[in-house]
Image: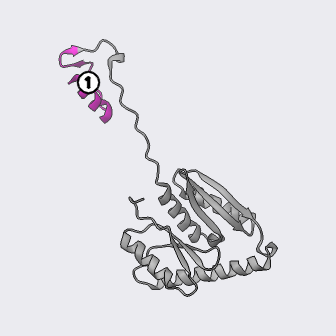
Amino acid sequence: MKQALLYVALILGTVLPAAVGGQELASDSQLPVAPALTPVKPDAGESAARVTRALHETKGVPASDITVSTHAGTIVLTGEVDSEAQRAAAISVAERTAEGARVSNNIEVRPLEERPLKEQQAAQQSAQLVRDVEAALAANSRTAHLGIAVTSADGRVVVLQGLVSSRENRTAVQNVASRVKGVTRVDNRTVVPGEQ
């Protein structure tokens, strides 16, 4: 009973007199030690979704050229950007938004005009597809408020990322994106908090 009272006192941060139940404790070494609390780490999938959304909301960051993924609890940024300033901005946004998760940067700087013509055209086609899917999501009353981040690396497959409140919203986002002309496949990486 004395130990239970002391645990409660330690947990609540209260001070008890040395005498408990009429008996005195011989020394401080007899006081029970409260167990250490382990901080809860944010879910990597939710952190990645927040980072993706933040990248899309940041001017000057070509979010459609950056892929956000997770590996062993680390948020991994990959892709190609046109300048060191864009790269630095993307890293800064990711680190601020990751909520304690480690960020690994694999973004390469390669100006668009230095890329082969076929790659330049693919980048333009991907950017147009992203704009079309974003417009479709914004025009749909069920998905307009969700803030879904859209990317495409090849101008045909779109990747959807973000936090959604329910499975129904996740399905709605998938359906709207899949109906956009030019989309051949949807990689739906949206996350419902608490699921995984």
Q: Amino acid at mark 1?
A: Gln
Identify the residue at the far bottom of this view: 181
Q: Residue at x 58, y 85 (%)?
A: 182
Above or below: residue 100 compared with residue 171: above
- Residue 109, given in percent of the width and then of the height, sits at 75, 64
Instruction: Classify the position of the N terminus by image quarter.
Output: top left
> Does the magenta portion include 21?
yes
Give the quarter of the image for residue 38: top left
Residue at label 1? 3
Above or below: residue 21 compared with residue 60: above
Identify the residue at the far top of this view: 26
Above or below: residue 37 compared with residue 111: above
- Residue 120, given in percent of the width and then of the height, sits at 74, 78
Instruction: Classify the position of the C terminus by image quarter.
Output: bottom left
Identify the residue at the far left of this view: 22
Q: Is residue 110 left or right of residue 164?
A: right
Q: Residue at x 53, y 68 (%)?
A: 53
Q: Is residue 109 left or right of residue 48?
A: right
Q: Which of these two is toward me, 170 or 6?
A: 170
Residue 13 seen in this snapshot: no
> Does the magenta portion include 161?
no
Q: Residue at x 60, y 82 (%)?
A: 129
- Residue 2, given in percent of the width and then of the height, sits at 22, 23
Range covered by the magenta-colored residues = 1-23
Give the quarter of the image for residue 26: top left
Give the quarter of the image for residue 39: top left
